[in-house]
């Protein structure tokens, strides 16, 4: 049996700046064979370690349909992420996982899919979005609503443009505050609801972002007729082991690391009531 606590070594193949405090890392696993030997589901996460500094959970920002590397997008917030941001192509990190449950991609087959992301909440959705786009015929209408504080804070700017150019995705982007040259929407994410036609009965809504954004977006979705079972989100909790052994991430009788981090809004309501 694999040792859940033993990290594999991964080489950083590339690092890209997304925003002034956020970078995306392409990781190639060095041990355990080719990257394609490492399988995961969108929505799962890895425990990523910088040797001699520490370890923390980070979601997969890439799709399992792309096997050349795994990607994660990291915002600088403390000791470990500061250290991550000093690393460059050729450096090595540790990777444990995949951890957690992930999004149920099979259950999304034939459904319309609505992705709603705020700020650094887009990375966990990006893995699922690319999975869906790489198997586009399996799914109904795909709509992406994304917001950030300012245009500078938008992650994956090239991909937002690429998705907008595709004929098979509807995408709307907004920022809380515009900057010189910004001609797009201004306002919080819920302003985008009026830009699109929603069919709650046949749509699954995936919502990731800061808790305050999730609160208002979920309220809006429920008001517009979505069932709590059709609204799917990810929870973040302080974690240590990442594999259901240490009790750090418990909410009620659930381990966010093992039973989540993906939950329906109905489950989240039951856990937090
Ligand atoms: C399942 C999961 C997936 C994650 N995916 C990503 C990701 O893809 N990209 C990314 O940038 N970050 C992600 N995070 C958050 C990341 O793991 C933490 O920010 C991590 O602690 C950073 O380590 P640090 O040493 O740099 O900061 P620390 O020194 O540990 O913390 C900096 C600040 O963030 C707070 N904090 C730490 N962890 C959390 C948490 N889980 N929830 C709320 N506040 C927290 C601390 O209280 C402190 O104020 C994820 C967290 C979880 C649980
Ligand atoms: S982080 Fe240890 S039980 Fe979840």
Image (spheres, rainbow, N blue to C red):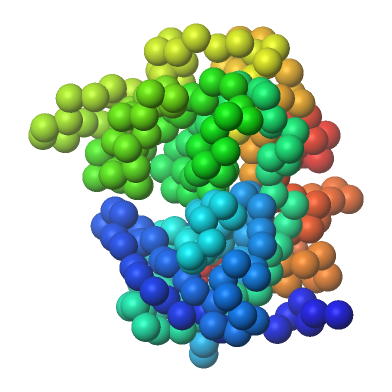
Q: Give the camera-side residue of 195 and 70.
A: 70
Residue 167 shows in this picture? yes
Residue 49 shows in this picture? no
The residue that appears at 36% across and 29% down in the rendered structure is: 166
Q: Does residue 201 appear left or right of residue 156 in this picture?
A: right
Q: Give the camera-side residue of 55 and 110.
A: 110
Q: Does residue 210 appear left or right of residue 102 in this picture?
A: left
- Splitting the image into 4 quarters, where does residue 7 fall? bottom right
- Single out the residue that lies furthest toward the right: 253
Q: Give the camera-side residue of 103 and 34.
A: 34
Q: Quadrant of the N terminus?
A: bottom right
The residue that appears at 61% across and 11% down in the rendered structure is: 199
- Is 29 located above or below residue 157 in the figure? below
Q: Looking at the image, in which quadrant does ligand 1 appear?
A: bottom right
The residue that appears at 29% across and 43% down in the rendered structure is: 157
Percent from the top left, x then y, of residue 142?
A: 52, 25
The residue that appears at 29% across and 60% down in the rendered structure is: 17
């Amino acid at each position: 049996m694999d040792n859940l606590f033993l990290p594999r070594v991964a080489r950083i193949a590339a690092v890209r700046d997304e925003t002034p405090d956020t970078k995306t890392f392409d990781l190639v696993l060095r041990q355990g064979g080719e990257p394609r030997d490492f399988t995961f589901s969108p929505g799962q996460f890895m425990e990523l370690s910088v040797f001699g500094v520490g370890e923390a959970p980070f979601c997969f920002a890439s799709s399992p349909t792309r096997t050349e590397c795994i990607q994660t997008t990291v915002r600088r917030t403390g000791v470990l992420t500061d250290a991550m941001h000093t690393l460059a192509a050729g450096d090595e990190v540790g990777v444990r996982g995949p951890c957690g449950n992930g999004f149920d991609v099979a259950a999304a087959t034939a459904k319309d899919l609505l992705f709603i992301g705020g700020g650094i909440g887009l990375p966990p959705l990006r893995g699922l979005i690319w999975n869906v786009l790489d198997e586009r015929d399996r799914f109904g209408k795909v709509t992406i609503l994304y917001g950030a504080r300012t245009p500078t804070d938008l992650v994956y700017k090239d991909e937002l443009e690429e998705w907008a150019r595709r004929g098979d995705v509807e995408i709307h982007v907004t920022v809380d505050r515009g900057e010189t040259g910004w001609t797009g929407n201004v306002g919080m994410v819920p302003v985008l609801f009026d830009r699109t036609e929603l069919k709650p009965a046949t749509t699954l809504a995936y919502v990731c972002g800061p808790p305050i954004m999730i609160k208002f977006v979920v309220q809006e979705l429920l008001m517009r007729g979505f069932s709590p079972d059709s609204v799917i989100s990810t929870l973040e909790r302080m974690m240590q082991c990442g594999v259901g052994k240490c009790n750090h991430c418990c909410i009620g009788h659930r381990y966010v690391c093992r039973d989540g981090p993906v939950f329906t809004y109905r489950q989240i309501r039951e856990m937090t009531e």
